[in-house]
Image (cartoon, rainbow, N blue to C red):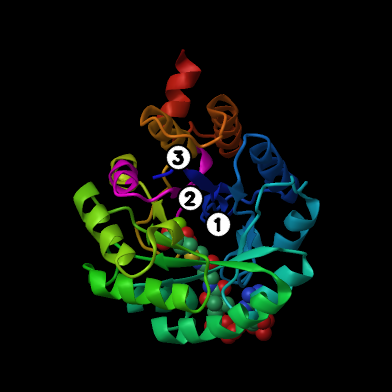
Amino acid sequence: MSDFVRIVEVGPRDGLQNEKQPVSTADKIALIDRLSATGLRSIEATSFVSPRWVPQLADAADVYAGIHRRPGVAYPVLVPNEQGYARALAAGVQEVAVFTAASETFNRTNTNAGIDESLARFEPILRRAADDGVRVRGYVSTVLGCPYQGEVPVSEVVRVARALHGMGCYEISLGDTIGVGTPRKARAMLEAVAADVPMQALAVHFHDTYGQAVANIASCVEAGVRVVDSAVSGAGGCPYAKGASGNVASEDAVYLLHGMGLQTGVELELLAEIGRWLSALFGRPTGSRVGKAMAAT
Ligand code: HMG
Ligand code: MG
């Protein structure tokens, strides 16, 4: 098993989408450019969703045009439909991420479509992406619980992950959107999906609402997953998931993984500085325990 874990930094997208206070385009670009210098290999840059639904990211094309794309770093963006895909393509994007859920009610709240309807929306995107040479990542949300339906059957997570992989998504990120999961449950869910989709094509995406995200990552990494989503300073949350809070902080994920003897290629000091800079922008302390500890020593 490889000892390299790829961190997918989702701060510029998941981290900012839930912020009420507007963030300037220049600050978004600065955030991404600073993250590009830390050794990260994947930085989710923004989201080409409807600006009515997520006003904070209405400047997606300007952000994408303004960043310095470092060779060797992927800058995926979220797209919900063909309209978003067309906007992303026009902006010069080389990787997109489509998103659906394992819970019908959440998916309707988030995208105004049922699960199967959203999967059907993705088919033409994947066909076009294959022709355009664009890579597509797929997200499954609410894999460990739904804010509206409660328990989510693992069989639904498996079904949706298999469908996304089957239609050509190179990687499936399993999202605990509201951060309710615990390590054994998270691992059991991951292993159930891995029985149908190769572990190398899976990623985990934990929100930290109940403080379990680091423990969940440790448990899933022990089970073999090698891609972890996180957001610098622990920013984030889905505006359409009641009660959702920040992502696991990238600083905390990197500290954990290095402590487990794994490599990420990420310079923790630089990441922690960016986390403090971003939190200062919002006028609050960093949400990263590691970031706080490093500032105090
Ligand atoms: P809808 O209202 O059903 O869409 O929303 P529509 O097709 O009827 O269009 C309505 C209007 O939006 C039209 O404009 C369209 O042109 C426009 P109007 O004619 O009224 O002026 N529109 C767009 N504009 C720009 N770009 C587009 C686009 N699409 C439509 N792509 C829709 C359906 C999917 C668009 C909407 O529900 C949406 O954008 N939802 C996104 C919500 C979102 O971004 N949620 C957060 C991301 S998911 C997440 O955070 C979870 C994750 O982190 C994993 C985890 O934690 O679990 C990934
Ligand atoms: Mg998320």
Instruction: Determine the secondary structure under disc 3.
Output: loop
Looking at marks 2 and 3 on the same chain, the residue that comes earlier in the sequence is marked by: 2
Amino acid type at image mark 3 = Ala
Image coordinates of residue 255 in percent, x first then y, are 43, 30
Label 1 C-beta lies within 8 Å of the nearest ligand 1 atom: yes
- Between 177 and 133, the one lying in front of the other is 133
> Which residue is labeled 1 in the image?
17
- The span from disc 3 to disc 1 (Cα, nearest Å) is 16 Å
Instruction: Please indicate whether residue 159 sits to the left or right of residue 18 in the image.
Output: left
Residue 236 marker: 2
Q: Quadrant of residue 274?
A: top right
Q: Residue at x 47, y 43 (%)?
A: 5
CB at disc 2 and ligand 2 closer than 8 Å? yes
Q: Using the image, determine if residue 32 lies above or below residue 174.
A: above
Say left or right for 37 vs 101: right
Instruction: Out of 45 and 192, give the one closest to the viewer.
Output: 192
Whole-number angstrom distance, CA of label 2 to CA of label 3: 9 Å
Report whether 70 appears left or right of 127. Answer: right
State which region is magenta: 217-239
Between discs 3 and 1, the one toward the N terminus: 1
Asked if residue 238 can be seen in this view, the reply is no
Which percent across, then down, holds residue 110? 45, 72
Whether the residue under disc 3 has CB within 8 Å of ligand 2 = no
Tag 3 residue: 249
